[in-house]
Every structure is written in structure tokens, then in C-alpha cells.
Image (spheres, grey):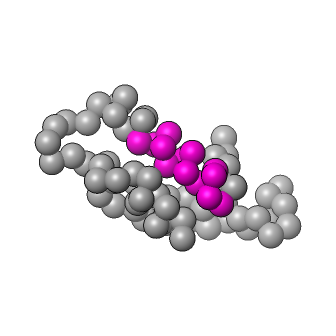
């Protein structure tokens, strides 16, 4: 479900979503887990800027927060 939400929110600029780590335990809390994803951003029309990618990343994070109460770990 998380991968689907990332793809939906990222739209056509997210060309690949890959889960590469799952962590449970420690200070996360009962029933919680940390997922790490590698995203590839790509446009057929132009070279993406940091600002372009930051906007897409923001949309993805907002959607994950709204839909599944996800939080970005710092």
C-alpha cells in the first residue's frame, strides 16, 4: 500500500519505487515499523531541478501522512 501511495502522489515523475529496509523494535513503539524506500525521479521532458524533486517529495510525504499517518524519521 505504501508503494502504491508513493506512486500515486509522485505521478509521472517517479519512475521507480524500491523498498530496501524494514526495521522494527527499539524506540519505534509497539506495532510500529520503519520503512526505507529508494525513489528514482525522472522526466521525459526536462532535466529535473532540486526544486522539482522537493515539490514531488513534499506531495508524497503529505499523502502518506494523510492516508496512513506515516511520519518521516529524522
Q: Name the foreground residue: 25 vs 72.
A: 72
Q: Name the foreground residue: 67 vs 23.
A: 67
Q: Is residue 74 left or right of residue 1?
A: right
Please tell me whether the stretch drawn in magenta is mainly helix, strand or loop. Answer: helix
Tell me the quarter of the picture where residue 22 sits.
Answer: bottom right
Q: Residue furthest left?
A: 45
* Image: 3 above or below 70: below
Task: Locate residue 58, reporting x and y percent.
Answer: 50, 39
Task: Locate residue 44, reporting x and y percent.
Answer: 15, 48
The stretch in magenta equals 56-68
Tell me the quarter of the picture where residue 53 sits.
Answer: top left
Q: Quadrant of the C terminus?
A: top right
Task: Locate residue 68, reporting x and y percent.
Answer: 65, 60
Task: Locate residue 56, reporting x and y percent.
Answer: 41, 42
Residue at image point 55% right, 58% down:
36
* Image: 14 above or below 31: above
Q: Quadrant of the N terminus?
A: bottom right
Q: Name the foreground residue: 14 vs 8.
A: 8
* Image: 62 above or below 26: above
Residue at image point 71% right, 65% down:
33
Residue 48 visible somewhere in the drawing: yes
Q: Residue furthest front?
A: 66
Residue at image point 34% right, 53% down:
11
Residue at image point 19% right, 36% down:
47
Amino acid at each position: 500500500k505504501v508503494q502504491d501511495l508513493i506512486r500515486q502522489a509522485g505521478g509521472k515523475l517517479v519512475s521507480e519505487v524500491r523498498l530496501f529496509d524494514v526495521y522494527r523494535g527499539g524506540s519505534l513503539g509497539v506495532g510500529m515499523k520503519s520503512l526505507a524506500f529508494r525513489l528514482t525521479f525522472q522526466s521525459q521532458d526536462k532535466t529535473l531541478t532540486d526544486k522539482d524533486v522537493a515539490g514531488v517529495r513534499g506531495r508524497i510525504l503529505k499523502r502518506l501522512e494523510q492516508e496512513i499517518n506515516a511520519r518521516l524519521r529524522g
